[in-house]
Image: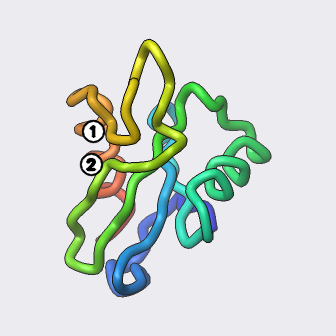
Amino acid sequence: MIIRNKIKKEEIESPFTKAVADIEKEIVSIKCELHIDCAEELIKNGSSISDLWGFNIYPDGSLDFVSLINIRPPKNRSMEIEDEKIRQKIETVIRNLIV
């Protein structure tokens, strides 16, 4: 499910929802079985893999930035997004889309 417009926080599943953000287009794909599935959905809709970052959304609105798709040496050597600017961009996109 690609989110381009606002959705209600209640649509986030327990215990968490896997998601991938396109930080350039400011859209998010959610509710996929794996982060790579969300990434592929965005790529099919014109996103560039270099703009995609995986994370999890919890029902209380908190995020964690851990996903296998985030491993991109030398830019990001961990499953966790290390760049604070990317984290902040994702948080901004989520605040604008999930109310």
Say what amino acid the circle numbered 1 marks.
Answer: Arg
Q: Residue 98 lies in what quarter of the image?
A: bottom left
* Quadrant position of the C terminus in the picture: bottom left
Say what amino acid the circle numbered 2 marks.
Answer: Glu
Q: Residue at x 47, y 40 (%)?
A: 53
Q: Residue at x 79, y 46 (%)?
A: 44
Do the CB atoms of the residues marked 1 and 2 lie less than 8 Å apart?
yes
Q: Residue at x 27, y 30 (%)?
A: 82
| Residue 31 point in image, percent of width and height | 55, 72
Say the numbered circle drawn on residue 91.
Answer: 2
Which of discs 1 and 2 lies nearer the camera? The answer is 1
82 or 1, nearer to the observer:
82
35 or 27, nearer to the observer:
35
In the displayed structure image, the side of residue 69 where residue 77 appears, left or right = left
Element at badge 1? helix
- As drawn, the residue found furthest toward the top would be 74
Element at badge 2? helix
* Quadrant position of the N terminus in the picture: bottom right
Task: Read off the residue under disc 1.
Answer: 87
Q: Is residue 36 above or below residue 15?
A: above
- As drawn, the residue found furthest toward the right would be 44
Label 1: few (<14), some or many (≥20) within 10 Å?
A: some
In the displayed structure image, the side of residue 60 where residue 15 appears, left or right = right
| Residue 72 point in image, percent of width and height | 50, 24
Query: Colour mode?
Result: rainbow
Q: Residue 12 lies in what quarter of the image?
A: bottom left
Query: Total of numbered circles in the picture?
Result: 2
10 or 67, nearer to the observer:
67
